[in-house]
Amino acid sequence: MRTRRLGKTEIKVSELVLGGGYVGGLLLHQDDETKRLAIRHAMEEGINFIDTAPSYGDGESERAIGWLLQEVEETPYISTKVAIDAATRNDLVGQIESSIHDSLARLQRNSVDLLQLHNRLGAEDDGPTLAVKHLFAKRGVIEGLENARSQGLTKYIGLTALGEIEPCRTAIESDAFDTAQVYYNLLNPSAGHQMPRAWVGQTFAGLIDSCRTHDVGVMNIRVFAAGILATNVRTGREIPITSEQDLSIEQCRSDAIFAALNDDNYTQAQTAIRFALAHEDISCVLVGVADIDQLQEAIAGGLSGPLPKSSIANLQKVYDSNFGLM
């Protein structure tokens, strides 16, 4: 599998990263033998990075990765996250230190390669959304992440670029972070694609440009749009993380996308991955899969290379018409 440069880090990351989250759920919902087969197959095919978080199965994803990696010879890069407690907002440095130590215990490791803020960002505190001011405050998030780095608990630090666009851009352009997890897919490519006025949806406009300017590695999340783009089979785990909450509308948009591409040589999931890989500023694509078949399908998509420019041109027509829903 091809690798790409992950921003200002020294990591050459595989174009696909194995995600340990809830939506795909392989590391949470499958039996132990399936988990073993998945990890071994991913490593054999060249995936060299696994992403997880304490909130994935209340620590179960991290625990699974911990024991699974004891059984393989490969040593993939590992990233996890920390979510600031929305109820208190106090002692952010202490929260981060406690969280990373708990994660490392579950992962059976002394350190991770990347520690990321998991909260959405906003101008003000709002439920789990964290006001951007908490990043830069004395004893704030950045100080806490840097403390973890100085203690050798992580090599790099990153953020999840979800929430309000201006606070996300402020964080990226602060030069404090090495990586950003950025929402980008066939249904909402606004983070790295000029969208027409007709387009309706939550905008992440300019985030990938900001990442490129500040040498922040772009880790593409939700490439399957919670599964809408990957398959027509629904698991009940199709949980949107943008303002586009109506799954029936998202399905109509997905149908319009694949009708325009009209390519029977690749599955929907493979096409979604190839679309993301067509953006040269995306360092890697995080894929969450439910089973071995989906993992093999994703790997085949990654190995097939980016979508051609002719396909991107066909997609532009779909976006110009707001998916034909105008």
Image: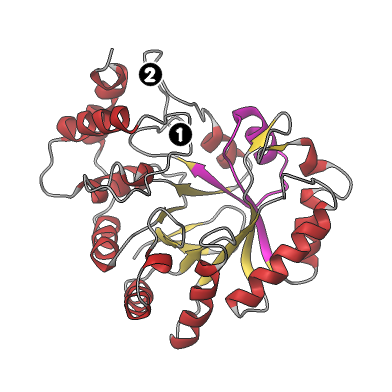
Place of residue 7 in the rendered image (x, y in percent of width and height, measured from the top left): 57, 52
> In the image, which disc is placed on residue 199?
2
**Sequence-first tag of 2 and 1:** 1
Place of residue 293 in the rendered image (x, y in percent of width and height, measured from the top left): 23, 65
Depth check, mark 2 against mark 1: the one in front is 2
Place of residue 193 in the rendered image (x, y in percent of width and height, measured from the top left): 42, 30
- Could you tell me the amino acid type at mark 1? Gly
Instruction: Depth check: give the residue in front, 126 or 41.
Output: 126
Left or right? Give the position of 37 relative to 98.
left
Figure check: 264 above or below 16: above
Residue stretch in magenta: 155-182
Instruction: Depth check: give the residue in front, 127 or 92.
Output: 127
Element on which disc 2 rests: loop
Magenta span contains residue 168: yes
Figure check: 226 above or below 132: below
Dividing the picture into quadrants, the one containing residue 113 is bottom right
